[in-house]
Amino acid sequence: MNPRPHLTVPARLRALAATLVCALVAAPAWAADPPPPADLDAFAQATATTYHLNEQDILADLHKAHYRQSIVDAMSRPAESVKTWKQYRPIFVTARRIAAGRAFFAAHHKQLQKVEDATGVPAELICAIIGVETGYGGNTGSYRVLDALYTLAFWYPRSGDPAKIQRENDRQAFFRDQLAQLFALANEQHFTVTALTGSYAGAMGWGQFMPSSYRQYAVDGDGDGHIDLFGGSMPDLFASVANYFVANGWQKGEPVAVRAVHDPSTIAFAPDDFTPKYSLADLEAKGYQPKVALGKPMMGSLLTLDGANGTEDWIVFQNFYSITRYNRSPMYAMAVYQLAEAIAGKDPDTPPSP
């Protein structure tokens, strides 16, 4: 029996392998954490000028920020873009989330009712927002807000699709503005920028406010001179969520949405957006009627969803549009609405009493 032949590696392959190993060992640290962007100084100067801050303090904090590839990856694949309503709804409108919402409602009923009385925003809607956003405060995000906004301000993901260039540029500009406003917010509320944590997109607190929303809509509900949306003040949190809706056109006592019946002999209608610009008569002419009588003329729009039991048609009103200002996804708005109705023990097909 012949001995097993000895296998040798050609010299040039050994040299190539050695080169690759050396390259990996010698890879620069910025392969995972890129160097500061070239316009960092200009950004700090512009932010300091706009918000009357100290430029060197801004730069010092920016140099503590880190690029996070996981943030770029998450932003590159938003979950909602590949889900239908029958897939999306079970994520948020669950028996566990409804039960937790009712418990949260009961625990804070007096404070919630006070805010509802003052603003007209239903207490159950405030609970539903907090429930959908953070599971009633259970998951507010573990990213440093500074890292999230720094990454998206200077390395917003690019698809390579020429048709998406303008949108991607706009989104990067949005996050650059949010990063600037983060420094303004920290100065105003005496936060330590490097200590704030939130979502991969830079949203913070139990209601997931972006820095601009925090500055524009957050309210000092307990009157202590400080606005805490991180769970330390329920009055601040509830008043701030309600104020967001009031500022975006919430109408007290008006419906959010109602199921519609579609005349199959008419062509399906898909509006460009959910601005309430169609009268009920307009929608009826297009083949859509409310499943239950509303008792008065109203302006609305139409939302068609792929539900678990087939196509769902909904006539949606100004209050639905107001929810889409919190998050522009119509499925998000519908999930918040249906969770709110479930928390309150209501039927989402029945509009509120006049």
Image: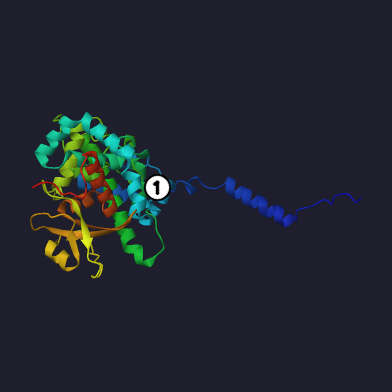
How is the model colour-coded?
rainbow
Classify residue 232 by image quadrant. Answer: top left
Residue 325 drawn above or below residue 199 = below
Q: In this figure, which residue is indicated by the disc labeled 1?
A: 71
Residue 348 located left or right of residue 117: right
Classify residue 135 by image quadrant. Answer: top left
Image spot of residue 26 (x, y percent): 57, 46
Image spot of residue 186 (x, y percent): 25, 38
Q: Nearer the viewer, residue 264 or 337?
A: 264
Query: Is disc 1 placed on a helix, strand or loop?
Result: helix
Image spot of residue 9 (x, y percent): 75, 53
Q: Residues within 10 Å of mark 1 (few under 14, many from 20)?
A: many
Residue 178 located left or right of residue 73: left
User: Is residue 8 at least partly visible in the picture?
Assistant: yes
Residue at image position (22%, 60%) is 261
**Callout 1 amino acid:** Ile
Image spot of residue 246 (x, y percent): 13, 46
Q: Nearer the viewer, residue 327 or 289?
A: 289
Classify residue 13 by image quadrant. Answer: bottom right
Q: Nearer the viewer, residue 221 or 39?
A: 221
Residue 123 located left or right of residue 144: left
